[in-house]
Amino acid sequence: MRYQALVSLTVLAAAAIVASAQPPSQSNYPPNVPSRLPPFIQPPERVPAPREQAAPAPGRKSVYRLIATDGHEHLYSTDSAEVDRLIRQGSFRMEGIGFTVFDQHYKDSVPLYRFVRPDGFHFLSTDANAGADQGVRREGVLGHIDTQPRPGTQPLHAWRNAENGSIFYTADQGGEQAPGIGLQYAGVVGYVGK
């Protein structure tokens, strides 16, 4: 009998503990906690690369344009996994698709290389050895571009920041906002897809 009473008390005690762990039936549970942190302590927004943009024409691939979160440089990539990683790290934000390149070598096309300088800034060139004597490292080929205009292409313009040497690339003839923020026109790199 004592054993049964002890078991009954243990079961009742366990039931009381479980009952006390249940949320109250009041409408204020869970406690009113702001769903967002105040703006001054918000983590940077990390948005994955857009996947819903129009597919490039057959034989071409998109070149994504990103901007560093500090605004000091643009980065160009055809690798969506790299783009996603950089955005999730919070070091770059997506600006969209800058232009398209050929996905392989075609008659009269040349490779468009991406380089990184010793100071971390990136640039593009059709010269495989650009800046080699200054410690520049070639990161790879984005794709291929034309050296002369042909139907379906447009010039890829380069604009240089005289303060830090970073280079902004755009297919926009007016340079988008480049002239207005003091970038200097550096010429046409080649011809890319529309």
Image: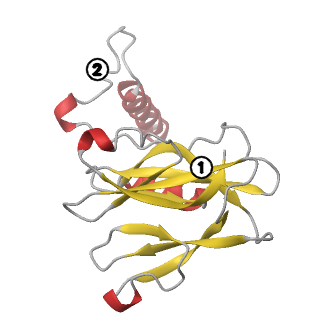
Q: Name the amino acid, label 1.
A: Phe
Q: Residue furthest bottom?
A: 133
**Position above or below: 11 against 86:** above
**Position above or below: 108 against 131:** above
Point 78% across, 47% down: residue: 57
Q: Residue 91: percent from the left, percent from the top?
A: 35, 56
Label 2: few (<14), some (14–19) or many (≥20) C-alpha neighbours in 10 Å: few
- Residue bearing mark 1: 99
Q: Residue 20: percent from the left, percent from the top?
A: 35, 26
Point 62% across, 57% down: residue: 191
Q: Name the amino acid, label 2.
A: Pro
On-image quarter of the C terminus: top right
- Residue bearing mark 2: 31
Q: Nearer the viewer, residue 76 or 1?
A: 76
**Position above or below: 66 against 106:** above
**Position above or below: 16 against 42:** above
Quarter where residue 186 is shown: bottom left
Q: Residue 62: percent from the left, percent from the top?
A: 65, 52
Q: Secondary structure at mark 2?
A: loop
